[in-house]
Image (spheres, grey):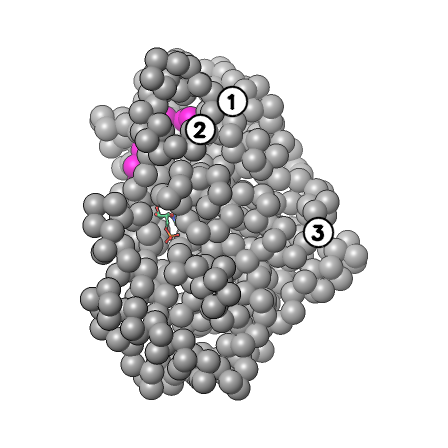
Amino acid sequence: MKSILVIGSQWGDEGKGKVTNLYSKNADIVVRYQGGNNAGHTVKFDGKEFHLQTIPSGVFNKNTINILGNGMVINPIAVYKEMQTLIEAGFDCSNVIISSRAHVDLNYHLELDGLKERKLKEKQIGTTKKGIGPCYTDKISRDGIRFADFIDEDFPKIYKEHLKEKNELIEELGGNPIDYETSIEEYKKVIEFLKPHVKETVSFLAKARKENKKILFEGAQGSMLDIDFGTYPYVTSSNCTSGGALTGSGIGIGYIEGIVAIIKAYTTRVGEGPFVTELFDEISTTIREKAHEYGVVTHRPRRIGWLDLVQLRFSQNVNGFKHGALMLFDILSGLGDIKVCTAYELDGKIIDYVPASLKETYRCKPIYKTFKGWNEDISKCKTYDELPQEAKDYVEFIEKELGIKFVLISVGPDQKDTIIREDIF
Ligand code: IMP
């Protein structure tokens, strides 16, 4: 395929980083299209470890162009720092392009994110406090600042006007006003550096497509955190589902040839909100420690639960994926019986969908199918055939239920710990 989209099918942290890293080696262009530095993944490279939050993983390949699409909200100071770290490590970042239509996640957005969360008290969303929600709010209310205007000579004036208004709000919420002079000095330094990277990206992508370039679209977060289809309001503020790739990059519908859903072999979530298959027993502790399930951005321990097919079917309906990547499969080894949720029980009735009502979702009880586990260490398996029969039963059950094929199965953190069943990109 010439263009594929890699998407998280659960609540994020499914292991997209490893897959996009793998596919980005073949990509001419990698595009991120939503979210900002609320995302985070670790890339291990030549014995070094890098934490990327805004920049796509193609940055390590000199010949791969990395686009930060128009659907993103980008903190210029954070992206500047991320680029500085990469430059110091020998990656010159000349292959990074920021869409002139992307919105600027400014210091007042970050401040407001924290203050709004504080005001919500026990109803907190548990955001990453990176300003994502307030920045998208400004975008939708047509009050945002885009990179085209950020690099314009009028930015100091525009920022001053916006800051005046935002400072009033900050003070109302009990925060300290942000100082204009200090902020603008820092922004000026960053603008100077970022200016050559800010470009018109829609025509760039169209040209690349016509030249038959290979394009990888890299989703952030996961489908259940989608602003429309996730467990609202405990979601992020962008469309993490496949539609977001179109609006967030400017690629036309029909130009993405395949979608690979990243599916973790169990479920995790960070932050608040309903989680029907959540576990509170020692299995969750074992999984958390074995897989080091702690947030890359916030370092919070992730909540753990069994695989939820109700959620995955919903995700499949919304995203339309036919291919999948099964991640962290080795973590299930030695756990004993393994459960998969096949339906929910809501007030005595069996349902096979995720309710829109939060109150109803909190009342849903999981109905499980139990699979016999396996004790073998599968992390050295190189082919599907080498997996124990019990592991294959688990894989094939999910494939059948979702009507998809797992093109790869991850059996360890390293790139080499991957069973490739089909080369699709
Ligand atoms: P926000 O995106 O910072 O506004 O946070 C909203 C919700 O999305 C919170 O529950 C966060 O924990 C969650 N979230 C945001 N980004 C990620 C991610 O990359 N992985 C997992 N959860 C995320």
Q: Give coordinates of residue 400: x percent, y percent.
A: 57, 19
What span is in magenta? Answer: 302-308
Residue 61's mark?
A: none
| Kind of residue indicated by mark 3 | Gly
| Kind of residue indicated by mark 2 | Val
Query: Is residue 396 rendered to the left or right of residue 167?
Result: right
| Main secondary structure along the magenta-highlighted residues | strand
User: Which numbered disc flags the more N-terminal residue, 1 or 3?
Assistant: 3
Badge 3 crowding class, 10 Å Cα cut-off, few under 14, some 14 to 19, many 20 or more, is few
**Label 3 CB sits under 8 Å from any ligand 1 atom:** no
Q: Nearer the viewer, residue 285 or 307?
A: 307
Residue 354's mark?
A: 2
- List the residue tagged with mark 3: 252
Q: Nearer the viewer, mark 3 or mark 2?
A: 2
**Label 2 CB sits under 8 Å from any ligand 1 atom:** no
For the residues marked 2 and 1, what is the alpha-carbon distance in whole angstroms? 18 Å
- List the residue tagged with mark 1: 398
Query: Is residue 115 rendered to the left or right of residue 406?
Result: left
Q: Is residue 306 magenta?
A: yes
User: Which numbered disc flags the more N-terminal residue, 3 or 2?
Assistant: 3
For the residues marked 3 and 2, what is the alpha-carbon distance in whole angstroms? 29 Å
Query: Is residue 60 rendered to the left or right of residue 348?
Result: right
Position of the N terminus by quadrant:
top right
Q: In the rendered image, which quarter is residue 361 located in?
A: top left
